[in-house]
Image (tube, rainbow, N blue to C red):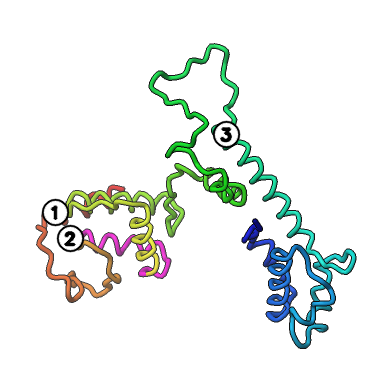
Amino acid sequence: MKDPAFPFYAQDFIVGTMHMTFEEMGAFIKLLAYQWVNLGIPKNRLGFILGSGWETVWASISDKFIEEDGILYNKRIEEERDKRKAFKLKQAENGKKGGRPKKNQPSDYKPNKTSKTIGKNPTKTQKNPLENESEYENKSVIDNRKEGKGEKQKIVYPFDTKTFSEQWAIWKDYKANEHGFKYKTAVSEQAALSSLGTLSKYDEATAIAIMHQSMANGWKGFFEENTTHGSTKQPSGKGESSYSDAFKRKIVGRLQSE
């Protein structure tokens, strides 16, 4: 039975066809598919396969193929065909033996009494040898994912200074104590930092002033800095602050002590 699919390496394809027009790229893909299905491309059938004007297109992509006895081949495609055949054969052999070969165990190794031994007949927990083809094709992708497994997402501050990080910690403490709110994920905290950076036009002094303004007025979020003297009214639609003057003096005193 012919293999119905061949591996498509996106980055390799983009790099290898960067110089091609869309017409040339389409012809190249069609020839690769024809070769995979028919085990080669008869040179005298190029006109039929590619259609009118094929000579111009072929002149631009002919370096991607080699010729043997009137049959054209893309070398990479045949290499992948051989690799897939070898992989399938190995998986089939392992399946006949009851699964993949076990790793060598220490001489004093004793199997767990509760473990089940898999015999020659496949069980529900065994995979069909051909179900693991993607393991071969995507091994590098899986390995890359494993490298980042378990890593905690790092918060990126809009201002890389000790002063800002301290003020941000005070803001989070204020939100937790006064509003019972904590950023549940790094994504939500990063979004708040991005909002603050945008609102302050990425000026550190302005960003800190916006945090002070919100805490002094008992607000839950950030708003543009109010530079009008004597006005502590929250922006429209947010309602008036319900926090006492004593609380406000406490926040201001803490900020001044930092």
Of label 1 and label 3, which has the lower sequence position?
3
How far from the left and from the top, in percent, is residue 104?
60, 22
Mark 1 lies on a secondary structure that is helix
Spatial CA span between label 1 and label 3:
68 Å
Which residue carries the number 1 mark? 247
Mark 3 residue crowding within 10 angstroms, few (<14) / some (14–19) / many (20+): some
Determine contact: label 2, label 1, CB under 8 Å.
Answer: yes
Residue 101, quarter of picture: top right
Instruction: Answer above or below: position of 20 versus 32.
Output: below
Instruction: Identify the image quadrant of the N terminus.
Output: bottom right
Which of discs 1 and 3 lies nearer the camera? The answer is 3
Which of discs 2 and 3 lies nearer the camera? The answer is 3
Of label 2 and label 3, which has the lower sequence position?
3
Magenta highlight range: 199-217
**Kind of residue at badge 2:** Gly
Which residue carries the number 3 mark? 100
How far from the left and from the top, in percent, is residue 242?
9, 62
**Kind of residue at badge 1:** Phe
Mark 2 lies on a secondary structure that is loop
Q: Tell me: 202 left or right of 59.
A: left
Q: Residue at x 68, y 77 (%)?
A: 26
Q: Tell me: 245 left or right of 164.
A: left
Q: Residue at x 83, y 69 (%)?
A: 63
Work out whether residue 243 or residue 30 is closer to the camera in this orientation and state it: 30
**Kind of residue at badge 3:** Arg
Q: Residue at x 61, y 41 (%)?
A: 91
Which residue carries the number 2 mark? 218
Of label 2 and label 1, which has the lower sequence position?
2
Spatial CA span between label 2 and label 3:
64 Å
Whether residue 206 is visible to the viewer of this picture, yes or no, is no
